[in-house]
Every structure is written in C-alpha cells, then in structure tokens.
Image (tube, grey):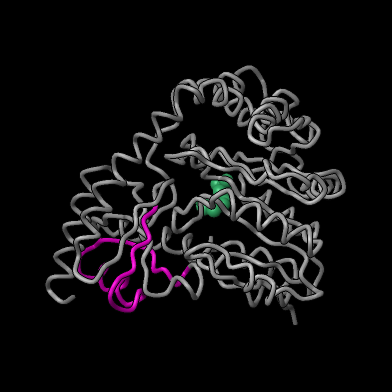
Amino acid sequence: AVSLAQRVASLAPSATVQNSDQIRSLRETGRRILSLSSGDPNLVTDERIVAAGCRALQDGDTHYTASAGLPRLRERLAARECVRSGRQINADSILITPGGKFALYAALQSMVDPGDEVLLPDPGWVSYAACVRLCGGRPVAVSSLGGFDLDELRARTTDRTRAIIVNSPLNPTGRVIPKEELSALADFARERGLWIVFDQVYCDLAYDEFPFLQAEPGLEDRLIVVDSFSKTFGMTGWRLGAFIGPEPVRKAVAKIIQHSIYCVPGFVQQAGLRALELEAELLPRYREHFHKRLVPTQAALARLAGWECPLPSAGFYLFPRITGDDKAFARDLLDTKAVAVMPGSAFGAAGAGHVRIALTCPEEEIAEAVAAIADFERSGN
Ligand code: PLP
C-alpha cells in the first residue's frame, strides 16, 4: 500500500495558515469577519514597485535567472548588510529565496541531520519547529517571553544540538532583543559550536534603535541571516527573501535552491530592486502606519480587566496576557463577535494564556474589533 513519509505524516498544519484559510472560507459564506490574526500587513505594494515588476514581464523577463539571484539585487542586499554588520559583506554571501521561509527551511536542511536538535524561541513563529521536524530534527523550545535565559539554554543543550534560532523583533511578542542579550547569545553559540540563525524579517519595523546580531564579532563562520521583503515592503505575495551566510552552508543552500525551485522569478527580483531604491522613502512611512495603530490599541487592551498588554518596540503584533484559556477565548470570540485573533499557545507552550493581536487590517476595523473584544470581556464571554 502507498504511505506517507513519517516526518510529514506526523507534521501538524501551520496554525496561522489554517486560521487564514478558515477566515477566507467564513468570508466566502458571506460572514463579515474582523481579522486581527493575519501576519499579512494591509499595505498595498507601492505602485512603482508593481510597475517595475510589470515592466520586467512585458520586457520578456520570463526566463530562469541565475539560480542564486540577480547580481544587482544580491549587491544591493550585501550593501545593506555591510551597514548592519559594520563589516565587509560580499554579494557572494547572499542567495535570493522565495521569502524568508524558504531561506530558513533550506538553511535548516543544510545543517540538521535526523535526530539533531535545534534550540528555538517559545513563544516563537509557528514554522520554526515544523521546519526542524521536516529535517527529521528535534525542536527544543526555550523560553523567550522575557528574553532568553542563558542557564536554560545551557541546560537544554546536548551533544546533538546543532543550531539556535534567534528572532528579533520576535513574532509573536514584538520584542527587540537588546544588545547585551545578543552578545550573550553570540558567546553561547561560539562556546557550544552551534550555528546561529538570525531571523530579521521584521527589523525595518523597529520603532527605536535596533541591534543586529551580525554586528557581534566572531560569528562569521556560523551566522545565518534570514531576510525578507514581505513584511516591510508589503510584498508578502511576491515571495521574495534572502539567505545570508558563510561559504559551506551557502553552497549547500545553493544546491537546494538549484534542485528545488531553481530561482525566484526574474520580474519579482526586479520589483525587489525597485523596492530597495525606494526604501528610504517607504520604510519610515510604513513604520508610522503601524505605530499609529499600535499605540492606541495597546492602551485600549491594557485597560481590560485582568489583561497585561506591554507596548512592543517593533512591528504590528501585540501579545497580551488574558485572563482565561487562550484557545477557548479565540474560538468563542470568533463565534460570538466574528473577531479573529491567534491563540498564544499556537506559538508554543509558553504562549498559553496570551493572544496575538495583529494590526494588519484597516484602522476602523481595528477600533471596531477592539470594542467587540471589550464587550466580550465585559459580558463575561
Ligand atoms: N519569520 C517570521 C518570524 C515570520 O513571522 C514570517 C512570516 O510570517 C517569516 C519569517 C517568513 O515570511 P516570508 O516567507 O513571507 O518572508
């Protein structure tokens, strides 16, 4: 009889993708749903970026590109990494990928053998553990709510530990990891001989100073950076991101790209080039767009009885601690008020008792959804 591979058969579907699918089907039945659960910002890709993509298509950019990506795009990204890291980064270090997700997946495929362990943040993005499992590895969750605890990291490291995933600003909490904590993580990775994967896909949405892990010294042989155009340029559907890393793992990832996707479509990369030309104009505007939503929403949620809602210093997520069970809350809120939020436990055991509120819908809908949440809480659910 035919059967599925164990590592896939035992894999849970993505909680966030499932949630988006559920909302899409509810809307198709004619129900009006206010969604505070999507990680897809309601930014329309700037028309000049769209025009660059269309022009490339019309000009016949319908062929494979170099598998590693367009040299000009790799150069532009390398120049940005030079500024972030304070050292020389060559275009050679960059591979263009379909989103940050594939960069992460291919990086893990290149470093994790069956039975190997990977340390990852809890709460943390839903795909980290799944990607590790797809490599036959074992995800090892480490508390990230108030920051990584070095003693906990040491206690959870074994001779099978191969890598640690660090995400700043962190999804779902919006926390920016401070410089001292990054230095301690860098020391830890060096001391234990681990790869360190830095997921910076929200870095351009930091409202204050943002410390980059690549500015830490002595990580050149072990640091992998996952970058993306999705969240910061409102380009989720274009599927454009990048892997940045040292030679052995980069060569491995290059082979995975060659044999799996070949390359990211050329017109998508051309659009990305245009986005980078416009970043000085667009990014401050997008930061302002989200900050304007974050501050009043945080204040409103922090006023709810029993809720604790810190103001994050980056991004468009709030991660309040609520009073009851997060899964029941999310389910009942959707049933009775047609408002969608993500239960915190979808992001790991340490997320239980929290919900993730994403400010990715129009401002009026956010206000309406927050009023509905307040009403739901007042009525004792
Ligand atoms: N990393 C984090 C923390 C995310 O939240 C996401 C998207 O939700 C990604 C990576 C991947 O995004 P993309 O593949 O669209 O670049």
Q: Is residue 285 left or right of residue 62?
A: left
Residue 25, position in %: x, y?
Answer: 36, 60
256 and 371: which one is in front? 371
Q: Residue at x 72, y 61 (%)?
A: 188
Residue 157 horizontal/vertical position (percent): 72, 73
Q: Is residue 141 above or below residue 166?
A: below
> Residue 110: where, in percent of width, then height?
80, 56
Measured along the vertical axis of the image, is residue 184 above or below residue 380? above
The residue under the point 63% across, 67% down is 150
Q: Which residues are magenta?
A: 317-346
Going 43% across and 60% down the picture, which residue do you hit? 21
Is 367 in the magenta? no
Residue 340 part of the magenta-drawn span: yes
- In the displayed structure, does residue 19 sit left or right of residue 236? left
Horizontal arrangement in the rendering, residue 309 relative to residue 270 (left or right): left
Residue 4 coordinates in the image, percent (x, y): 71, 75
